[in-house]
Structures are given as C-alpha cells and as structure tokens.
Amino acid sequence: MEKMWAGRFSKEVDSGVNAFNSSISFDGRMYKNDIEGSIAHATMLGEAGIISREDSETLIKGLNEILADIDSGKLELDMTAEDIHMFIEAELTKRFGSVGKRLHTSRSRNDQVALDIRLYLRDEIAEIRALVYKITDVLCNIAEKHTETIMPGYTHLQRAQPITFGQHLMAYAQMFLRDLERLDDVNKRMNECPLGSGALAGTTYNIDRFMTSSLLGFNAPMVNSLDGVSDRDFCIELSSAISIIMMHLSRFSEEIILWCSWEFKFIELDDAFATGSSIMPQKKNPDIAELVRGKTARVFGDNMTLLAMMKGLPLAYNKDMQEDKEAIFDAIDNVKLCLSTFIPMLETMSVYKENMRNAAARGFINATDCADYLVKKGMPFRDAYKITGGLVAECIEKQTDLEHLPIECYKEKTDLFADDVYNAISLDTCVRERKSYGGPSPESVAKQIEITRKKLNK
Ligand code: ARG
C-alpha cells in the first residue's frame, strides 16, 4: 500500500522497516474507536464549515459502512498497513475518492491515536469494572454462608486468633471495593478529549473542540494541545489499578493454593476448575490460582513497561509511544481473563468447615482470650499476658492445650482463675465475642456484608 506521506520520499520504505514500524497487528483492535472518533471529527468539520455538509455526510456514511464491513468480516485489516488509522483512511479514499482525502483536515494521527486509546480504554474499564463488581458480589454471597464457620486467622502464617471464613472472604471484598473506586478514578481523569490537539500545536482551522468532546461523551476537551498528544499517564494509571487488582487476586490465589493442600484441606476446588498430573494419578492441582499468581508478574511488567517507556521522552509525540498499546492491552486482557476464570472457581469450591474448625482448635489460638479473661477480672494486660505465656509453656510440656489443662494448674498461677475460664476460652466464645466493628463475629460479618452490598449498589 502506498504511504500517505510518500510525497516527500523518493523510495518505498524497506519491507523490513515497514514490518518493524507497523502497529496494525495490535492497534487493529481499536477500529471501532477510530471510526467513532472520525465520525465525530467529520461531523464537526461539516458543522464548522471547514468541509461541505455533503462531504461530511459522505464521510460519515462511508465510515459507518467500513465499520459494518469490518464487523461482518467482509473487510479484512491489511497487515501491511502502517496502522489502523492509515488503513481506515485509505479504505475511505479507495471507496470515496477525494472526499475520503478530506477527513484528515486539521487532524493528526497524534491526536487521533491519543483519542482512540482513551475511547478503547473507557469501554475496557467498564468491562473490568463489571468483573470486579461480580467478584465482590460473589464474595458477599459466599461469606453469607460462612458467618459462623470458624477458622484460624494467621499472622506470619502462624495460627494467631480465631476468625470466621466469612470474615476472611470479606477482607478481600473490601480490597475489591477499593479496586472499583480506583477504576472509577482512572476513568474520571482520563475522560477528557485530546482531539483537536493536532500534531502538537492545535490548528489554524476554526474547529470546535467542545463539539467533538461532547459528541464523544467526554467531560471537556483537554486544555493544552501539547499535553493532549504527549502524555500516557492514563495508561500508567490504569495499568497500576490493574496491577493492584492482580496483586489482590494473586494473594487470594496463594491462599487458595495453600488451602487446597493436604496440609490444610480447608477447601476443595471443583473438578471443572482443577487439573491433573501427567504422571501422578492422585494429583488435583490448583492450576488456575497458580496461573493467576503467575500472570500477576507480567501485568506488573506491563506497568513497568509504560513507566519506563515514558520517562525520558521530550514533548510531544515520539514513536516510542506506539509501545503503549501492547502493554496496556496485555494488562487488560489478562486481568479480564483472570477475573472471569477465578470467579466461577470461587463459586464452585467446597468448603471443609470441620477441617477449618479443627485447625482453629489447635495452636493455642485462644491464648489472647485467656489473657483477656484475667484482664476482665482486673489484672493489667502485661501481667495477664505473662501468666498465659507460662500456661502455654506448661501445656506444651504436658502435651495438652488450654481447654484441657486442669483448673488446679490455672489456679496455681493466680486465684483470679475460676471454672468459667473454660467457657471464656472456648472457640465459639472467642469468635462470638469478637464483635467489635469490623471484627470476625457472625454479627460483625453480617454487618460487613450489608455495608458492602450497599456500596456495590449505590
Ligand atoms: N501508530 C502510531 C502509534 O500508535 C500512531 C501515531 C503515529 N504518529 C506519528 N507521528 N508517526 O503511536
């Protein structure tokens, strides 16, 4: 295909260079957005009298035809074209001759591509948002069934204090709620229109940037034309927000992997969401969770690609910036893929309440409650802490636990202990009484679910 800029050159571009330079293999996915932007531009050109109304209408009709033909597969993208912008403009000219050549009046590919990416990302953010909404909703539903399911809570991966499975799941729900806010925030800042920035210095034509901005559903045109074509901060922000979603998913994956192990056996994944081994017949592997954890690394890489790509670029457009697309597209594709596989994996997993409870019953998880018992009887916390430490040491020596240690052993330490200590340190009491706001008790978790659902539906 002859280059639109061929006029200045005496030779055709080397075929290797053409392939090296071309971005249509990856920016082709923005064809709808490119056409949407061009229709707004053509409309404005006609309205402002920069081209005739008739030409404007022909361009709009032609662009819609091209859109329909690409959608239906009738028109295939030409992989030797330089990029999607050139391809569509060339096709328009092929079909409508010199009218097609008027489309690019007072526009540059620099503002065009800055626009297309924003339009594309806006749609993608809506899709990612729907998935993050879904996982938060699913977590509420599962947590609701487990407000009374006791499990060990950990710090340092050591059994620490008893919690409920509902509480554990709702912790993730809060993280995903913040992820939703972050996506909305990215969208808010991104939603300004660069079209009309031209190559970098605006234009001498009497364009109406407010018209194109509002036709395309933006809040306002971008204020500075250099900025309009120069920055990709919105890609960096979005890939950061996506990286944080992936980080949350990856931690969750790590726990799923642990919980599936024979050592924990807190949950079992549905057969449809696990895989086997080629050699070990007994294996059932949590591949999905592992792959999500693995893919998190590449998404972090995408974020770093974008940051590093931009750090040394002088204003305004530089071709380096063509590299933005593969990085941000990769982050988007992977977060969507991960969320949409992870959600049904969660929905179909079995929860082994007994194993969770048994694990919570070991490891002196109620030691804090034993100390708190003494505190409630008037002892300063530090003294109570020390006495309980001594009791734990005694239990370890006698190979027993606090629930089974005879009352005489307690009384030897202090007279404040009475028979009611056993009730105070029972697992059920420990969990039921942790009803501080945000805590793991059944009623606190039910409250968290209520608050979360409210936030989701506002
Ligand atoms: N394919 C290019 C990109 O993605 C479009 C902009 C080209 N602009 C230019 N001045 N060569 O960045």
Image (tube, rainbow, N blue to C red):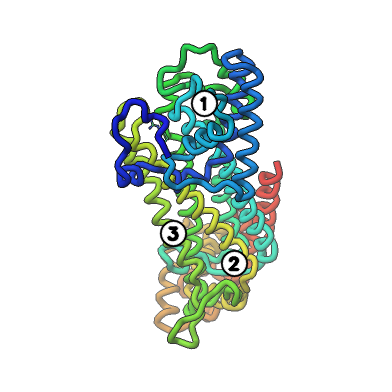
| Residue 198 drawn at (x, y percent) | 45, 22
Q: Report which residue position mark 2 lands on.
A: 345
Q: Work out how far the residue at label 1 is from the one at label 3, CA to CA, in angstroms.
A: 44 Å
Q: Nearer the viewer, mark 1 or mark 2?
A: 1
Category of crowding for the residue at label 1, using alpha-carbon neighbours closer than 10 angstroms: few (below 14), some (14–19), many (at least 20): some
The quadrant where residue 68 appears: top right
Q: Work out how far the residue at label 2 is from the one at label 3, CA to CA, in angstroms.
A: 17 Å
Q: Quadrant of the C terminus?
A: top right
Q: Quadrant of the N terminus?
A: top left
Q: Secondary structure at mark 3?
A: helix
Identified at 41% across, 40% down, the residue is: 82
Foreground residue among 174 and 288: 288
What amino acid type should be assigned to the residue bearing mark 2?
Met
From the viewer's perspective, is residue 190 above or below residue 42?
below
Identified at 53% across, 37% down, the residue is: 91
Q: Secondary structure at mark 1?
A: helix
What amino acid type should be assigned to the residue bearing mark 1?
Lys
Q: Nearer the viewer, mark 1 or mark 3?
A: 1
Identified at 48% across, 39% down, the residue is: 84
Q: Work out how far the residue at label 1 is from the one at label 2, CA to CA, in angstroms.
A: 52 Å
| Residue 407 tag number | none
| Residue 295 tag number | 3
Q: Earlier in the sequence, mark 2 or mark 3?
A: 3
| Image-quarter location of ligand 1 | top left
Q: Earlier in the sequence, mark 1 or mark 3?
A: 1
Q: Report which residue position mark 1 lands on.
A: 101
What amino acid type should be assigned to the residue bearing mark 3?
Lys
Q: Are marks 2 and 3 in contact (CB under 8 Å)?
A: no
From the viewer's perspective, is residue 281 above or below residue 416?
below
Identified at 62% across, 40% down, the residue is: 67
Q: Is residue 351 left or right of residue 316?
A: right
